[in-house]
Amino acid sequence: MTPEFDGLVAIVTGGASGIGRAVAEELTARGARVAVLDLKDTEFACDVTDDVAVRAAVTAVAEAYGRIDVLVNNAGIGALGTVADNDDAEWLRVLDVNVVGVARVSRAALPHLRRSPHAAIVNTCSIAATAGLPQRALYSASKGAVLALTRAMAADHIREGIRVNCVTPGTVDTPWVGRLLGSAPDPQAERAALAARQPHGRLVTPEEVAHAVAYLASPRAGSTTGVELAVDGGMSGLRPRPV
Ligand code: NAD
């Protein structure tokens, strides 16, 4: 059977670690040629807050592979605290990566996506966009904006044949979560407690998110646009267990 992404080219931002790395591996396994755009040492090293670097990297991908069919806007950074805890500089820094970064890379990729018969954008959002999580004011605002942007872009580009969707992961076992746990007095106990708080009793794996991204990006999802696909172990859909 021909792999579903056979002949297609995908860009994955933040693809050097965690969810992005799993997405890059999944799309490669399904036949895509994948270009990772990341701060870290990748073939297409790029900071999504740098418009000149973004445009140069997207152009380099198009020249190297001849086309761009799929864009996965995954690069993102976290922020802890209430609305009172982050100053303006921190707000602008996080929004620049998490929100403007999505717009910036999409803007650069759109001319190439318009030429693809299977164009798709998938944004990595978060349950923080809608859940009302404590100590996540800035991060939640940034992901709320990603959700709104996903829907607006889906409306704007549907008649150009470009689908735009997002995944909303719960707590995913990535280096990011490892860093958060690492600062706790007892990281192992904290990890166990975190897993126990998930409705399905464990953390989500990056591979589970990658499968959802691959579905939304694939030609098989040709009639799906403007949606969020939760990969959160039931966190957004289920009531807590009765005690
Ligand atoms: P991670 O820290 O493991 O990986 C993030 C990657 O993004 C890194 O490789 C990093 O170098 C890259 N990156 C960061 N800033 C960048 C920039 N300015 N330009 C280019 N690359 C940049 O994190 P992760 O857990 O895999 O998170 C990936 C995405 O998933 C983020 O958007 C995050 O908000 C989202 N998310 C994560 C979780 C979770 O529990 N881990 C849950 C929901 C959503």
Image: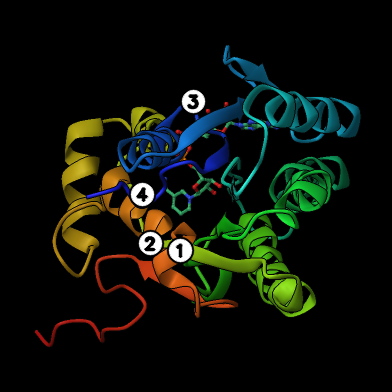
Q: Quadrant of residue 143?
A: bottom right
Q: Quadrant of residue 41?
A: top right
The reply to whether the C-beta atoms of the residues labelled 4 and 2 are less than 8 Å apart is: no
Q: Marks 4 and 2: which is nearer the front?
A: 2
- Is residue 47 visible to us here? no
Location of residue 236 in the rendering, given as x and y in whole percent from the top left corner: 37, 77
Local secondary structure at mark 1: helix
Q: Marks 3 and 2: which is nearer the front?
A: 2
Residue 7 lies left or right of residue 102; in this view the side is left
Residue 208 lies left or right of residue 60; in this view the side is left
Residue pointed to by mark 1: 219
Mark 3 and mark 2: Cα distance apart in space: 21 Å
Residue 154 lies left or right of residue 70; in this view the side is right
Local secondary structure at mark 2: helix
Residue pointed to by mark 4: 210
- For marks 4 and 1, the one nearer the N-term is 4
Mark 2 CB near ligand 1 (8 Å cut) = no
Residue pointed to by mark 3: 16
Name the residue type under label 3: Ala
User: Residue shown at 41%/32% (left/top)?
Assistant: 21
